[in-house]
Image: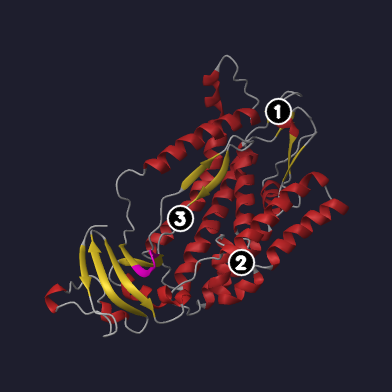
Amino acid sequence: MSGRRETGICGSGPYVPPMSDRPEEYPRPEALSHTFYVYEVDRGDGEIRYYGEPLTPKASVVDRVAPLFRDRGYRVTLRYETGEHVLVAQKRSVGVDGIPWVNVALFAATILTTLVAGAQWYDIPLTGNPIAIAGAWPFTVAVLGVLGVHEFGHYALSRRHDVQATLPYFIPLPNVLGTLGAVIRMKDHLPSRTALFDIGVAGPLAGLVATVAVTAVGVSLPPIEVGSDALIRQVELGYPPLIQAIAFALGEPLVYEDPSLMVNPVVLGGWVGAFVTFLNLLPVGQLDGAHVARALIGDRLDRLQMAVPAVLFSIAGWHLVFGDSRAITLWIVWGVLALVLSRVGGARPIDQSGVDRTRKAIGVLTLVAGLLCFTPAPIVFAG
């Protein structure tokens, strides 16, 4: 990186540039003297590099200096490059710079893959008439609507707490749903456990509201008629208590006596919302449940999340002995993923002060709501 390089003398204390060269917008090297010994500074457009040596355990350096940089509009990382430790401070920006073409392209691709999946649920033949795929638009709107509301819940609270985050990345996948979900990336330090809680809980709560609304609309729509050889008949869904309760409250069935009738595919949007909510509320790794749990109980989460893979593997074992053997693979896969996520670690806020009682109550209720989205065999394939 080209920029202005300022060199100090090793062994004589932290480097201090002349007063005339000290721009107030970035932390002075002497401000880091208790944590990071600076002997060289390299300034460039939007980035400042402090070369030196950690004076505390490396794992704690960033936690200690991050508030100083955040107050001046920077996020900081500690790297080891060509034999030197370097603190890299980059300008923060919570806005969207230009058109996010990657997000747009992935969203467009996910619209296409969900339309293809929806055509299977509606039993719309596409051979010779590909434009008929447009008839599956209610399925696409339902699925992407629920996923989008969930992710924009995170995004809105990230902006509220001045945390740099990306717009949602939708993940297209040519499967029976047409997608693997959506994610946002937080590219910033979390200022407090309160911010971590608000950002973490906002997605599931927003997603639950969307799930209830989409499910209510879906069960109120007329069922569809599909042929006996329809591909979608090979898929069996298990509806969690939340979906069943909504259908019961509205007096609408989820299964019909006539085998040629199936619930309107819009209901699948609600099913996706419930399934995504349950999985995201698992207290492990970078999932929403881990953010909420860490905000509530702090570092005790490190012990709690080790139990998550064991629970998921136990569900697979229960299916092996008592349940549906077709659901074993799903829980084994998620057990392995949870094991990997527990090793990766999660977000750690700068301020470790606990959250207030209201947030604690909301957190507990959210985790309980996640249990209403659980079903032992959410999706299995016949034959």
The label nearer to you, 2 versus 1, is 1
Q: Does 60 appear in magenta?
A: no
Is 223 in front, or is 232? 232
**Is disc 1 surrounded by few (<14), some (14 to 19) or many (20+) residues within 10 Å?**
few
Q: Are marks 2 and 1 in contact (CB under 8 Å)?
A: no
Q: Which mark is residue 231?
A: 1
Alpha carbon separation for disc pair 3 and 2: 25 Å
Task: Please say if 126 is above or below 195.
Answer: above
Three-letter residue code for mark 1 = Leu
* Circle 3: residue type: Arg
Which residues lie in the magenta part? Answer: 81-87
Q: What amino acid type should be assigned to the residue bearing mark 2?
A: Leu
Magenta region's main secondary structure? strand
Q: Which residue is mark 2?
A: 365
Residue 68, percent from left and from top: 32, 75
Residue of label 3: 185
Rendered-image quadrant of the C terminus: top right
Q: In this view of the protein, can residue 373 be seen by the observer?
A: no
- Total marks in image: 3
Mark 2 surroundings: few (<14), some (14-19) or many (≥20) residues within 10 A: few
SS under mark 2: helix
